[in-house]
Amino acid sequence: MRDGPLYCLAVADSQPCCGSFGTLTWRVKNSGRGGHSGFPQNCINSIALATAVTNEIQERFCDDYPPTDGEAAYLFRTGCHMKPLQLSYPPSSTNQILPWLEVHGDIRYSPFYQLADVLTQVEQYVADVNDHIEDLPTFGVNSSYVLPPEVNLEAGENRRATVEFEWGGARDTFKLFEGVKVRLDTVGHKAMIQAFRETYGGVRPFSIGSSLPWLKIYQEQGFDVQMFGFGRLPVFHGVDEHALLTDMSKGYETIIRLICLIEKLA
């Protein structure tokens, strides 16, 4: 089986897919000091802190993982990106400064970068932020991430802001979701391209920024991993995800033609 192609039918848009991104999830807890909004000089605003911390980490990530020529050649629409997606915080009111704010997000990285490097470097960004928290940009004259000695604290309160980082899964789990770039010079890939060309009257390969589990592992084991599918990309992983019977019917024709081409070329 390793001498032949391994087709994954988990993509969409009825065209060959040449690559996918790896995915990591993360959480950052930004802890300051809460209090009445009328006394900002006695507080560390966790919203301001989270804004500065997220911006610093994102900027460093973008500097270290810029777009590559390989990504363009494989028709990826974006380069690597790291972004916040959700917030969580304690119950409060509009006259209170929040003591902490959690930011939840993800990283999408292309198969032209390595998982181990991403994990190590992001953890280093956070360590650097904690070591130099006072150097982060502030917002207004009463904004600070380190309170002066004259501010009296209760037990357990922070004089210096802290940032706690946590990955959203184990490294072994993230390994399952590494991105993949298919081989473009194999019989399996060429037959796939030709099958779509004959069935649809043309072919438009593309790559996606989402993840397909296990494929990188199969590829490392020697399988010729190739990808396509017949769902609809606009509703991919949406609440109304669906496919059309007409697309499935055309997909059946494509697969029959693909099998014939593989047998002919084998």
Image (tube, helix red, strand yellow):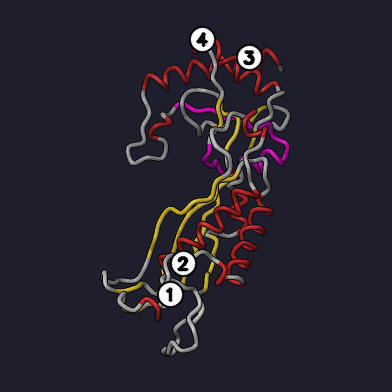
Of label 2 and label 4, which has the lower sequence position? 2
* Alpha carbons under labels 2 and 4: distance apart: 55 Å
Task: Assess whether mark 1 and mark 2 are in contact (beta carbons under 8 angstroms).
Answer: yes
Task: Assess whether mark 3 and mark 1 are in contact (beta carbons under 8 angstroms).
Answer: no
Residue at label 2?
49
Of label 3 and label 2, which has the lower sequence position? 2
Of label 2 and label 1, which has the lower sequence position? 1
Residue at label 1?
44
> Which residue is found at the position 50% from the left and 77% from the top?
146
Task: Assess whether mark 3 and mark 4 are in contact (beta carbons under 8 angstroms).
Answer: no
Q: The residue under label 4 is which amino acid type? A: Gly
Of label 4 and label 3, which has the lower sequence position? 4
Q: Residues within 10 Å of mark 4 (few under 14, many from 20)?
A: few
Task: Assess whether mark 4 and mark 1 are in contact (beta carbons under 8 angstroms).
Answer: no
State the mark number for residue 201. 4
In percent of width and height, residue 15 lies at 52, 23
Q: The residue under label 1 is which amino acid type? A: Ile
* Alpha carbons under labels 3 and 2: distance apart: 59 Å
| In front: label 2 or label 4 | 2
> Which residue is found at the position 63% from the left and 43% from the top?
66
Q: Residues within 10 Å of mark 3 (few under 14, many from 20)?
A: some
State the mark number for residue 261. 3
* Alpha carbons under labels 2 and 1: distance apart: 8 Å
In the figure, 31 relative to 159: above or below?
above
- From the viewer's side, name the closer residue of 9 and 66: 66
| In front: label 1 or label 3 | 1
| Magenta span of residues | 209-230
Residue 152 lies in quadrant: bottom left
In the figure, 55 relative to 247: above or below?
below
